[in-house]
Amino acid sequence: MTTAEDAARLGLHKVGGRPPLRDYVADVWRRRTFIYSMARFKIESENQQNSLGMLWVILKPLLNALVYGLIFGLLLPSNTRPPHFVEFLLIGVFVFEFFAQSWTAGGKSITNNASLVQSLAFPRMVLPLAAVTQRFLQFLPTVGIMLVFLLASGNRPQLHWLLIIPIFALYFVFSCGLALVTARLAAHWRDLNNFLPFLTRFFFYTTGIFFSVEERFGARDGHKGHPTIIKISDFQPIHEFLSLARSALLAGDSYTIDERYWLFAGTWSIGLFVFGVWFFWRAEERYGRVD
């Protein structure tokens, strides 16, 4: 009888081994309270050394929006700015910031916790999920800021504002899936973490944070525009989420909800999350291994 067979007979399991997918997912679900607690602890630990403390959770996105608003508000001619430019920009910066931070933090979640991975037995999926949860908890106050700013700008509360709940729920699921895929890739190819800032910057300048993709590349004044770019952006998930959020909060003559984006965003979110869970689980035994 081999050692493995003898251990199985005695009910012993390999430390760091990969259980069946269903058991693995169930184990992660049982640790959902720990995921939430870890996310909250990370937020507090990152800000406790600052004089302003937790206030930076709100100040950082506000300062980002202010900087981009001043820069692009001066650089872009007034006739090329989308309607309600300030609100348009604020929603774009806040919503994109969550994506960028989640992607970066999720990608580094295994490599930045190597000692924890090597010393304790637990489903490693907890780490990227906790990283995205942390960024989502930091994102929620900025949603409140967006709503307050809309009210201060003369917008009345509308029933369709409630659509941001399913939109951001799908956005969270999408970010979790992306973090799981990136965390596995970065664990085995650490150079990927150095590329992430450039990738997020690429998406920032091409997704339509401070300009409307449809107006910039659409047909107008007798010009055909660039229909290919419009079609590509239709299937770009970050553009879809930005458009849905802006349509929900600024719905009216200027912004209408493209119902296709609900289907596209839902497919991206659920599909990427399911694939991410499977893809991450497949390498469970390899995380923390010292070769």
Image: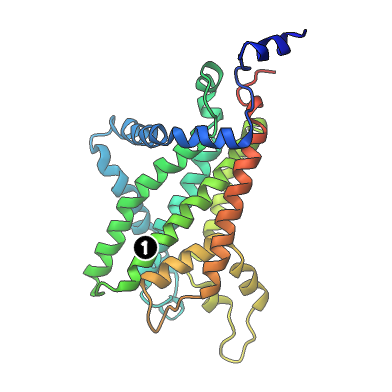
Q: Residue furthest right?
A: 1
The location of residue 273, given as percent across then percent down, is: 57, 49
Residue displayed at 42% across by 61% down: 166
Q: Quadrant of the N terminus?
A: top right
Q: Quadrant of the C terminus?
A: top right
Name above or below for residue 76 compared with residue 69: below
Q: Label 1: few (<14), some or many (≥20) within 10 Å? A: many
Q: Is residue 95 visible?
A: yes
Coloring basis for residues: rainbow
Is 279 positioned to the left or the right of 253 in the image?
Answer: right
The location of residue 95, given as percent across then percent down, is: 42, 57
Residue on which disc 1 sits: 90
How many numbered callouts?
1
Residue displayed at 25% across by 43% down: 55
The location of residue 84, given as percent across then percent down, is: 36, 75
The location of residue 241, given as percent across then percent down, is: 49, 63
Residue 130 lies in quadrant: top left
Residue displayed at 52% across by 42% down: 104
At label 1, the amino acid type is Leu
Q: Who is closer to the viewer here, 93 or 237?
A: 237
Q: Secondary structure at mark 1?
A: helix
Q: Is residue 62 visible?
A: no
Name above or below for residue 198 compared with residue 66: above
